[in-house]
Image (tube, grey):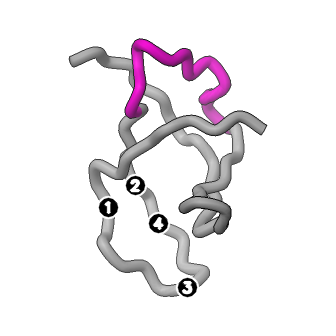
Amino acid sequence: ETYLGVAFCDGPEEVPFDEPILVKMALMYFPALQYSEVVRGETFTLREGGLIVGYGQVKAKYMQSF
């Protein structure tokens, strides 16, 4: 499994357990790191250290350098 750094940009601060939400995340290391595995429809897990804290599906991908 590949680990990619992401950061939340937009979404609720707290979410009730097992409630679906839509959030916007930034690809933290783009363009230095390739995020070619992030494609629409792909599923993912969110981890904090060794703990899985969420999961989801990619709805869209927008690449922009700053």
The residue furthest left is 66
Q: Which residue is label 3 attached to?
A: 17
| Marks 4,1: beta carbons within 8 A | yes
Q: Which residue is mark 4?
A: 21
Picture quadrant of residue 39? top right
Amino acid type, residue under disc 4 in the picture: Ile
Front label number (3 vs 4): 3
User: How far is the residue under mark 3 from the one under mark 2?
Assistant: 16 Å
Residue that badge 2 annotates: 23
Say whether marks 3 and 4 touch (CB < 8 Å).
no
Q: Quadrant of the C terminus?
A: top left
Closer to the chain start, of discs 3 and 1, is: 1
Residue at x-position 45% and y-position 42%: 6
The reply to whether discs 2 and 4 touch (Cβ–Cβ < 8 Å) is: yes
Q: Position of residue 5 (x, y in %)?
A: 49, 38
Q: Amino acid at mark 3?
A: Phe
Q: Position of residue 38 (x, y in %)?
A: 60, 29
